[in-house]
Amino acid sequence: MVRPTTIAASLERAAESCPHCACKDFVKRGIRRNKLQIVQLYKCGNLACGRTFTSRTIKGKQFPWPVVLDAISYHNLGYTFEEIPKILEAKRNMSPQPDTVAKWYEEYKPLCRFERLRPYAMNILAAWRRQNRDIRFDMVETTTLAHRQLYRFRYHRPKLILMLEEYRNRNFGRLTDYLDSVSTETPHQYFSEGQRMSEIRSRFDKAEMIVKGKTNFATRLAKFVLQAVPENKERHEMLQRFMIANDSVTVATEVPVFIRKEDIEHMEQALKFQIVGEEGVVLKPRAERRREEGKLPRLLTGHIDLVQVRNGQVHVLDYKPKAAKERPIEQLTWYALALSRLTGLRLYEFKCAWFDENDYFEFYPLHVVKKLQRKRQRNVRYKDGSVARIPTKNVLTVV
């Protein structure tokens, strides 16, 4: 049996800077042990500070942070406080008391907004179980997709049903139809034959589009969750698992999407979208292929990290470590185009964003592919009172 201290130590994320002075010059200064975990200590190299700290922003927890996150998630997935310790004992070899789990849930309730929807979602789940006693219904439907690599598609059907009851979201029933069909009707052969959207570099015209940079609830959740994740490759899984269970707007993760060449041609001809143009596209180099330029592939495929429904729009989100240095405009625009085509929703109803623990950048994909022929200069005003001039040249503008 693996010792709990070994498990906890392996899940501790390395520090990036001193939390007191933001200095990145620090050294390891021993460890702190308790009955259930080992915590790495660091000493700040700033002479004016010199304080000892850990990589955690959450203090005073006897149990490792992943255990706390799992406990909160299991309750929002429909389990009682009495059932959760048994699940954690089997999964992590640690069993907090039900009162402890209840205190965690109450403490972090402001960050886990699904708690206000949980009673209604439980009623929906109970009704399904009464009607179909032979079928097991879970709060979140999970399907593993073998598309060159394994993707974990998660779908929170009760949450989406509740979101569609809001007047602003009333037209998104087609999104429900598509997500309902993913587990049973996805053409899996497409994802082995098609070109990945992340490997396409389209020459999208960035005139008349603005990327809005800010911080929001997604950045707060990422900072809250990812302090427990030491490996970059595990960040997506941990964040997706927590957000689908605990926030009030994330309805699906790792959503498979595809778009065919004839679909793109229809958008260009019927909707007058500027997608490919005369110059074609650029394929990113892989180990078995050099950089190529030319015509659009017959089929493009991808998997959307997070799909949210809020404020009358479908939000297509991608988690990117060091988001401030990333510019995944093309990839996210392809995701939105594909999901628009598959659901029949207008591209006007989509918004794209990428984010990490510190930054959140969003834009309208319609502004990328649809250009208005206006000569006068225009400005855009945001809810926070800021004003930005809409660019007329093919230059990416971040506000």
Image (tube, rainbow, N blue to C red):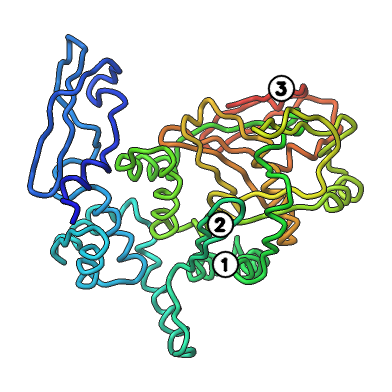
Residue at x-position 50% and y-position 57%: 152
* Residue 200 on image: x %, y %: 72, 37
Question: Looking at this view, is 2 or 55 the one in front?
Answer: 2
**Label 2 near label 1: C-beta < 8 Å?**
yes
Residue marked by disc 1: 164
Q: In the rendered image, is residue 313 in sight?
A: no
**Residue 395 numbered tag:** 3
Distance from Cα at disc 3 to Cα at disc 2: 30 Å
| Label 3 or label 2, whichever comes before in sequence order | 2
> In the structure shown, which secondary structural element does the residue marked by tag 1 occupy?
loop
Residue at x-position 50% and y-position 38%: 355
> In the structure shown, which secondary structural element does the residue marked by tag 3 occupy?
loop
| Mark 2: few/some/many CA within 10 Å (<14, 14-19, 20+) | many
Distance from Cα at disc 1 to Cα at disc 3: 37 Å
* Residue 318 on image: x %, y %: 55, 43
**Residue 309 numbered tag:** 2
